[in-house]
Amino acid sequence: MQENNMPLDTIISFKDCNIYQQDHLVLSDVNFEIKKGEFVYLIGKVGSGKTSVIKTINAQLPLEEGEGRVAGFDLTGMRKKDIPILRRKLGIVFQDFQLLTDRSVYSNLEFVLRATGWKNKTEIDERIGQVLEKVGLGTKGYKIPHQLSGGEQQRVVIARALLNDPDIILADEPTGNLDPETSEDIIKILRDISRNGRAVVFATHNYTLLKKYIARTLKCEKGKITETDHDEELEFI
């Protein structure tokens, strides 16, 4: 963890950007920067553009207007062949888990590693052990997803996101299907990950979490993104 007086490098930067879903302008004049090791909330009502921001960061939506840089990549006019390289620097945590239900936790993680070029069985075993320990599931690798609680499944998703040691974790409503206590466990894990130097973007409309675990907050509202002061009343639910 870096000292407060040490500069942090910018890992995500949007300047004068317009974000579209197909031909529909979702957000205009988007300007923000996120540093390595920052934990940042992205909030707003359903349909306000949170997911569009996440999809633009991971190049699922093209950025055609403005200047956007993520993990050293220029999003504007990005070549298709560079998108998989960018995505290896990103870990994605989904609300609906998207685990392979016909195989064990270990096999879910092994599938991702082999798909991204890992071949050595010993190294694969070691890496899977490391990420499962990180999320408190060191003894659950043999389990099938349906044998796990929702919170445990989300921990597996976080472990999966960490496999290739990404610079950025994008969490899109990761607590949306979880009870309050389990949601707190998940946010604690993600905050701990940010303290180890990764940027974490946590898209949510969970007002309770936001008030309890205060962090820098970007708000999507009325086609804009603004930085929200926590001393103000956050009326977005």
Image (cartoon, rainbow, N blue to C red):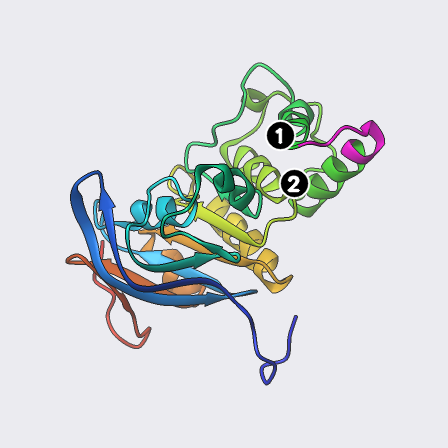
Number of residue marks: 2
- The reply to whether dot 2 and dot 1 touch (C-beta < 8 Å) is yes
Q: Which mark is residue 33?
A: none
Q: Residue 48: image x %, image y %?
A: 21, 50
Instruction: Tell me: residue 215, above or below residue 188.
Output: below
**Residues packed near mark 1 inside 10 Å, few (<14), some (14 to 19) or many (20 plus):** some
Image coords of residue 148 (percent x, y):
57, 27
Tag shown at residue 163? 2
> Element under label 1?
helix
Q: Nearer the viewer, residue 6 or 59?
A: 59
Whether residue 217 appears in magenta in the rendering, the answer is no
**Amino acid, disc 1:** Val
- The answer to whether 133 appears left or right of 175 in the picture is right
Q: Is residue 130 above or below residue 227?
A: above
Which secondary structure, mark 2? Answer: loop
Answer with the quarter of the image where residue 79 lies: top left
For this view, does 181 lie left or right of residue 206? right
Q: Residue furthest bottom?
A: 5
Report the magenta residues as a range. Answer: 117-124
What is the three-letter code of the residue carrying label 2? Leu
Q: Residue furthest right?
A: 122
Residue 115's image quarter?
Answer: top right
Query: Which residue corresponds to the image point at 53% horizontal and 47% vertical from the top-left?
Result: 90
Left or right: residue 221 versus residue 113 is left
Which residue is more in the foreground, 158 or 28? 28
Q: Which residue is mark 1?
A: 112
Mark 2, other Cα within 10 Å: few <14 / some 14–19 / many ≥20? many
| Mark 2 to mark 1 CA distance (whole Å) | 8 Å
On the image, the x and y values in percent for residue 108 come to 62, 25
Give the residue at x 41% y 37%: 95
The residue positioned 60% from the left and 56% from the top of the image is 193
Of the two numbered discs 2 and 1 on the same chain, state the one appearing first in sequence.
1
